[in-house]
Amino acid sequence: MIILGFCAGSYSLVGPIFISETTEADIRGTLGSLCQLMVTFGIFVSYLVGTFVSWHWLALITAFVPIILTILVLFVPESPRYLLSKGKSKQAREALRWLRGAESTHQIEDEINTVSSLNRTLGQFFLKLYKYNVKLNN
């Protein structure tokens, strides 16, 4: 039960962050909302199935979807924003091209430039915030 709680808690943090970092701006809010809706729908289905089968079968049935998703997530690239923050711009372009289904990296150059600029701005902001906080505590 502890492992289940840890995994569910991890997903509730990582899932929406990955969705927000990888989706296009015009559908980002919808997909972010669908994330929570699918969690709620999964709980509903578990209760529904649980009324017809024993808890042993329910545990096996509800383990099927997470196992499949764990296998599939191995094929998803890292977030382009994360890759850019680590200085891996070529890999970030390839990841974004894969996520968008673009034929070439030229189709996603504007978005790469925007994310790269945003990463620099946020990095500078948090660095200043950290320095300011250190000065206050000393």
Image: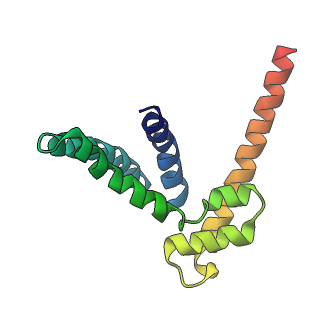
- Rendering coords of residue 18 (x, y %): 53, 53
- Residues 105 and 76: in front is 76
Determine the residue positioned at 79% across, 30% down: 130
Image quadrant of residue 104? bottom right
Determine the residue positioned at 60% across, 66% down: 111
Locate residue 92 relative to residue 42 in the image: left or right. right
- Rendering coords of residue 96 (x, y %): 58, 69
- Rendering coords of residue 117 (x, y %): 71, 57
Image quadrant of residue 43? top left
Residue 27 visible? The answer is no
Q: Quadrant of the C terminus?
A: top right
- Residues 130 and 47: in front is 47
Determine the residue positioned at 48% across, 54% down: 19
Residue 32 visible? The answer is yes
User: Which residue is farthest bottom?
Assistant: 103
Locate residue 72 relative to residue 117 in the image: left or right. left
Q: Quadrant of the N terminus?
A: top left
Image quadrant of residue 84? bottom right
Numbered disc total: 0
Locate residue 134 relative to residue 50 in the image: left or right. right
Please say if 2 is above or below 135.
Answer: below
- Rendering coords of residue 20 (x, y %): 50, 52
Please say if 73 is above or below 11.
Answer: below
